Amino acid sequence: MSKSNMKPSTLTIILRVAVFTVIVATSAGFYFIQNDLRDSVLKNSQKNTTTSADSPSPEALQQVRNEIAKVQAYGDKAVKIYASAADYQSSITTDLNKYAASTGVSISDFNYSPSVTAGQQIDGLNPNYITIKLKSPLSLNNLLQFLKSIETNLPKMSLTGINITPVAGSSTNVNVEPLTIEVYTK
């Protein structure tokens, strides 16, 4: 074997320089990788914040649109509950004639009158009454369909009372006294 001319002190110096170089290289590598990761996280964080704040997901937008449409529909329906005082008579006459035609009932007379009762009133709303005469005799089923149409109408109409009597010899036909319908106007 050949003998090396290296002294132990030289070998110690070389090993110390090598270990120092590895430590410096590793520290520098960790430093640069850490800075790169920090920059990457900051960019992604800002991008996610900007994306969620500036442009929500399509699903979230659709959900918001659906909620707005639902609330708008409730608002539109609420506005239609009460009739306008200016044109309620023509609106109610049209609605009643439409319901009468669709249910096979004939209306022979309309009589409009303002509120005559001193009952409990709702602020801003005025009760008005419409008395209608139906041509009798008529089918009980048709009368019930007509009354259901009145009660579910917008603007809201409410039947204040009804008097019906059976037609002699018929199990399906009835005679109807004039109906009084209450309508609130603004």
Image (cartoon, rainbow, N blue to C red):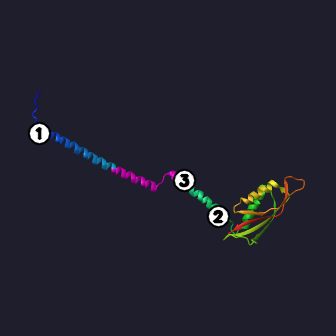
77 to the left or right of 118: left
Give coordinates of residue 56: x percent, y percent: 48, 54
Of marks 1 and 2, the one in the foreground: 1
Which residue is under mark 1?
Answer: 9
Distance in Å between CA atoms under marks 3 and 1: 77 Å
Could you tell me the amino acid type at mark 3? Gln
Distance in Å between CA atoms under marks 3 and 2: 25 Å
Secondary structure beneath dot 3 equals helix
Residue at the extreme top: 1
Q: Residue at x 80, y 55 (%)?
A: 142
Give coordinates of residue 148: x percent, y percent: 75, 57
Q: Residue at x 42, y 54 (%)?
A: 49
Which residue is under mark 2?
Answer: 79
Whether 184 is among the magenta residues is no
Q: Residue at x 35, y 50 (%)?
A: 40
Secondary structure beneath dot 2 equals helix
Could you tell me the amino acid type at mark 1? Ser
- The span shown in magenta is 38-61
Relative to 108, is 173 above or below? above
Q: Residues within 10 Å of mark 3 (few under 14, many from 20)?
A: few
Which residue is under mark 3?
Answer: 63
Question: Who comes first in sequence, dot 1 or dot 2?
Answer: 1
Question: Who comes first in sequence, dot 3 or dot 2?
Answer: 3
Whether pointer 1 and pointer 2 mark residues with C-beta atoms closer than 8 Å, the reply is no
Magenta-colored segment: predominant secondary structure: helix
Among the 4 quarters of the image, the one containing residue 21: top left
Question: Who comes first in sequence, dot 3 or dot 1?
Answer: 1
Give coordinates of residue 171: x percent, y percent: 86, 52
Relative to 108, is 59 above or below? above
Could you tell me the amino acid type at mark 2? Val
**Between residues 16 and 55, which one lies in front from this camera angle?**
16
Whether pointer 3 and pointer 2 mark residues with C-beta atoms closer than 8 Å, the reply is no
